[in-house]
Image (tube, helix red, strand yellow):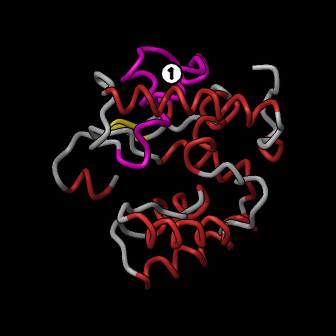
Amino acid sequence: MVQRALAGETIRKDWTPLKDISPHLPRAIMGGEDSRFCEHKGVDFQAIQDAISDNADSGRRRGGSTITQQTSKNVFLWNGGGYARKAIEAWFAVYTNTVWGKRRTIEIYLNVAEWGDGIFGAEAASQARFGKLAKDLTPREAALLAAVLPSPNKWRLDPPTEFVNGRASTLVQRAEVIRTSKYDSCLGLENGA
């Protein structure tokens, strides 16, 4: 947010408690970013190993960061890569996972994530993109928001590209698996939604 504000961009943000955000959104985020969110301790070493292996085999870059690591980076660190920043990010992820816990981590993530155009947080994104409160997001709308992460200024939602539409369709399915398999049990979300 600070980087965008210093660049002269108008910042839109509304802090919203997790209870006031549709449960479809954290499930869609988990489906796209970190399906083992409830299982790891802030860093998913299997995901990192998979990313290293995939990156070596395919020429395409894929990350292995967890939601907790992304939250730690967004709250405490700077954008950009580098092994030093990644090491500090991993330390913060383990620390915040212990201190905040899973429910608070996902709440913070949903409130500090950027959805493009200086829009930060689920509430501001929901209102800007769909003209409704975050608690009223449908599974498809939640998946569309999740589909543009982690590149919201590259993968646009207004209007969604064919890639974003396809990714959103996949995330609707993944979110439903997360709900029915109770992979989101650490969040204490209403399960019927």
Q: Residue at x 56, y 49 (%)?
A: 33
Taking 117 as reference, is 38 left or right? right
- The quadrant in which the C terminus is found is top right
Where is residue 184, by image quadrant? top right
Is label 1 in a helix, a strand or a loop? helix
Q: Most extreme residue toward the front, as rendered?
A: 57
Taking 179 as reference, is 51 left or right? left
Q: Residue at x 48, y 62 (%)?
A: 63
31 to 130, vertically: above or below: below
- Label 1: how many residues lie within 10 Å, few (<14), some (14-19) or many (20+)? many
Give the amino acid at mark 1. Glu
Q: Residue at x 16, y 48 (%)?
A: 8
Say whether residue 134 is magenta: yes
* Residue stretch rendered in magenta on the structure: 123-151
Say whether residue 186 is magenta: no
Residue 101 at what x, y percent from top left? 75, 58
Taking 86 as reference, is 185 left or right? right
Where is residue 71, by image quadrant? bottom right
Q: Residue at x 71, y 28 (%)?
A: 176
Front residue of this view, candidates 69 and 100: 69
Q: How many marks?
A: 1
Front residue of this view, candidates 17 and 27: 27
Q: Most extreme residue toward the left, as rendered?
A: 8
Residue 149 at what x, y percent from top left? 43, 44
8 to 163, vertically: above or below: below
Taking 40 as reference, is 146 left or right? left
93 to 176, vertically: above or below: below
Q: Most extreme residue toward the bottom, as rendered?
A: 84
Give the residue at mark 1: 141
Front residue of this view, candidates 191 and 33: 33
